[in-house]
Image: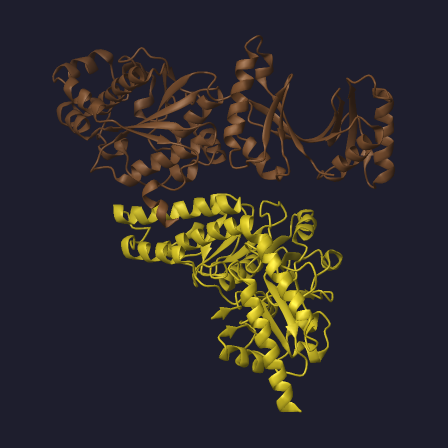
Amino acid sequence: MIYLDNSATTKPDPGVLKSFEQISSHYFANPSSIHPFGGEAEKLLNMAKKQAAELLKVRQEEVVFTSGGTEGNNMAIKGIALQHQQRGKHVITTEIEHPSVFEACKSLETLGFDVTYLPVDQSGVVSVKDIQKAIREDTILISVMHVNNELGSIQPIKEIADLAATYPKIFFHVDDVQGLGKVPLSLSHPGINLCTISGHKINGLKGTGILYVDNRTTLFPLFHGGEQERNLRSGTENVAGSVSIVKALRLIKDKETSMLDHLYEVQAFLLHRLKDISEVDINTAEKAAPHIVNFSVPGIKPEVIIHMLAEKEIFISTKSACSSKQSDESKILAACGFSRARTISALRVSLSFETTKEEIQHFIDNLKKAINQFKKVME
Amino acid sequence: MEYDHILIRYGEMALKGKNIKKFTVKLQENVQQKLKAFPKVKVKRTQGRMFIILNGEEPTPIIEKCKDIFGIQSLSLAIKVKNEPEAVKEAALFALQNSEDVKKFKVTVKRIDKNFPIRSQDLNQVLGGHLLSNTEGYTVDVHNPDLEIKVEIRLEATYITSSVVKGPGGLPVGTSGKSLLLLSGGIDSPVAGYLAMKRGVQLEAIHFHSPPFTSDRAKQKVMDLAKQLTAFGGSINIHVVPFTKLQQEVFKEIPDGYAMTIMRRMMMRISEKVCEQESILSMTTGENLGQVASQTMESMNTINEVTNYPVIRPLVTMDKSDIITISQQIGTYDTSILPYEDCCTIFVPKAPKTKPKRDKANYYESTKDFSSLIEEAVSGIEKVKITAETTIEPTFEDLF
C-alpha cells in the first residue's frame, strides 16, 4: 500500500498506540477522584500538560486538551464570539478555511454576527493589507489557518500576528492543524491568542487535540459541567488520549528538526515528475508547505483517477476529506481564481516523513497509466 | 538585521566590592542552567556586564526565562554592529521600529572608542535626525522618553540597546548559603521560600507526611510546589519525614491546648537535625505574625525555644493579601489551594492555646520520652531531588 493521503489522516505511531493502550488499561481512573488511583491519573494528565507546554514553548495553563481540530476551532471561534460580543460582533476570516472554521463562522452569522471572508491570491495566500483594511471598531476576532489543507499554501501568520498585536481588543486564532510539524510557527508571539492542533494529523490518534489559549484570553465554554480543563472544557479528561497526543507531538517535533529537508526533497521530486505529464496542471504554488501537492487533470473526473489508483493500492484524495461530501467543485481552488475545468478536477497528494521517492515514482507510473487508459476509452 | 544579544544588568550585586566576581560567576552559571533548552545560546561575562549571545535563537522565550533569575536587575535586547556610522544608524532605526507603544524617544551615545569619527554629542544629533527623517509619528523627548536607545561604541564593536525588561533583582541563588524551608503545601511557605531565594539562598525543603491520614497527593502537591520553586534557581532536595507515629503520640499524650504547639516544636527539632546532617545553617518558615493561633508572639516564642538555629521568616510582617499576590505571580497559588489535607490540618484541637508558655510546654514534654520517636522519624526520612527538568517521572517515561 502506498498511502498518500496524510493530510486527511496519518498512520498512528506504534509508540503512541502503546502509550494509549497502557494508560487505558492501567491508569483508567478518573483524574478528579480523590483516591490515589485517581491521583495517578491526575499526575499523568499534569505531566502531559507540562510536556505539551514545553514542546509548544507556552505555559502549562495555556494548554487545553480537546477532541481534535474541529472542536478546537469551534471552541476558539464560538468561545470568543459568545464571551466578547458586548465589545463587538465582527469576525474576520478567509475564503479558504477548513469547514470547521467556515461553518462555525456561518453559524455566528445566524446569531447576528457579521463575518468578513477575505479572498486569497492565485497562490492561495491572504493579504495582510486586506486584513488591516477589514478591521473595524467592532472587530473581536481574526481567524486564519496556517497551512491550507487542500493547497498547502502558507499564510503570513507572523505578519498577521504583528498586526493583531497592535489591536489589543482583537483576538487572533490560528488553525495550525495542517502546519504543525511541517511549517514552524512560534506560539510565543504576543499577537497569537489561540491555536488549534489535532493529534491524528501528526501520527497521533483520532479524538485527540490541543487548543492553545494564551493566559490573557477568556472563552465562553462550549461544554459546561465538572469544570475540568480550567473550566474551559468540562467532561472527564481523556488521560490516555492526552498523553498520546503529547507523545505524537514530541515525535513530530523531532522529525521536524531532523527530516524536514528530506520531506522537501521528496516533494520537489514529486513536483518535477508531475510537470513531465502534459495532462497535469499543478495548482500548488511555490513556497508551499512541504507535504501537500495539489494538481488537476482537466477533463478527467478526479474520482475516476482515485479509484483507478486505488486498484493498485495507491491512496490519494480529491479535496479535503471534510469537504468531499459537498459539491464537486473545490471552493478553495475557486477562491484562488482557477478555471472551473481545474477546480472540478483537482487531486491532492499529501506526504508523510516516511514517504519515499520510490513510492512517488510508483505513484507517477500508475497515474500516467490511468490517464492513458482513460484517454483511450474516450477516443 | 536582527537582535543578536541580550544585555543583562546587575542590580545590587554591582555594589559588591572585591567579592563581585563570586556573584557574577554564580549568576552566569544560573543563567546557563536556565537556558539549557537553548543549546545555541552562549552566556558571556565581560567587564561589568553580561551578555547572552543568541546565535539565531528567538529572543522572546529566552527573555521570558531570564525574567525570573535573581540577581538580574534588567534585560535589554541588543544589536552588535561594526564601529561604522552607517551601521550604527541602521541599527538604531531597527531598534526604534521594533519597539512597541513608543511615541517619544531619546538617543544616548557613549563613545569609548575614540577612533570613531563622530563625537558623542554630535552622534546624538546625527542619529536623532536619521530616526526622525526615516519614520513617522515619533518625537524626541530627552526628559521623559518612552524609549531610550542606548548606543555604546566600545573598542571591539558598537552595541545598540533599546527596550528594558525588568528582572526580579535580588542576589543570585547560591551566593547566600543554604536554608531548610518548612514546606507544608499551603500558600505561605512557597512564598517564603521564594523570598529567601531572592536573597541568594539555595533551598532544601522539609515536609512532614502523615500517611494514611494524609494522601500521596498531598505529598505530590509539595513536590509540585518545590518544582515550581526550581524555576527561580536550581534543584531542591526535599526531605520527607514520616511523621504519623510521633504526631499521633503527641496528640494522645499532650493536653489538647498544647498539642499544636508541641507538634511544631517537634517539627523544629527534626528540622534542626536535618540541618545538622546536611550542613544547612538556617531554617526558613512561612510564619506570619498573628495569622493563626500558632503564629502569635507567644507561640513563636515557645516554638522557637527548641532551636538556636536562625529562623528566616520572610513573611512575618506581611499582609495575607500581599502574600497571595506574590503566590499568584510566582505560580504556586493554584497548586497551594488544592484541597488536600496536610499534617497540620488532620488533627485540629478544639481550643488551641493562643498564648502558650515555655515552661508549660517543657513540663508537658517531660511527661513522656519523645526522643526515640524523633530519632525514628529522622532515620526514616526520604530524600527526593526535584530538578527543573524532571517533568516526567521515571516510572512514566515510556509513556511519553
Task: Provide residue A184's location: percent of width, then percent of height.
Answer: 60, 51
Q: Which residue occupies the foreground of this view, B103 or B235?
A: B235
The answer to which quarter of the image holds residue A30 is bottom left
> Does the rendering let one see residue A293?
yes
The quarter of the rendered structure image containing the C terminus of chain A is bottom right
Task: Provide residue A53's location: percent of width, then percent of height.
Answer: 48, 45
> Does the rendering let one see residue B171?
no
Q: Is residue A224 above or below residue B76?
A: below
Task: Provide residue A89's location: percent of width, then percent of height.
Answer: 63, 61
Total labels: the figure holds 0
In this view, which residue lies farthest toward the top?
Answer: B18
Left or right? Give the position of B239 relative to A102: left
Q: Which residue occupies the foreground of this view, B90 or A260?
A: A260
The answer to which quarter of the image holds residue B381 is top left
- The colour scheme of the drawn protein is by chain
User: Which residue occupies 38% across, 37% down?
Assistant: B224
Chain letter tied to brown: B
Q: Which residue occupies the foreground of this view, B26 or A229?
A: B26
Q: Is residue B307 above or below residue B40?
A: above
User: Which residue occupies 73% across, 72% down?
Assistant: A337
The answer to which quarter of the image holds residue B140 is top right
Left or right? Give the position of B392 relative to A196: left
Task: Provide residue A222's location: percent of width, then percent of height.
Answer: 48, 61
- Which color has been applied to chain A in this rendered view? yellow
Q: Is residue B267 above or below residue A76?
A: above
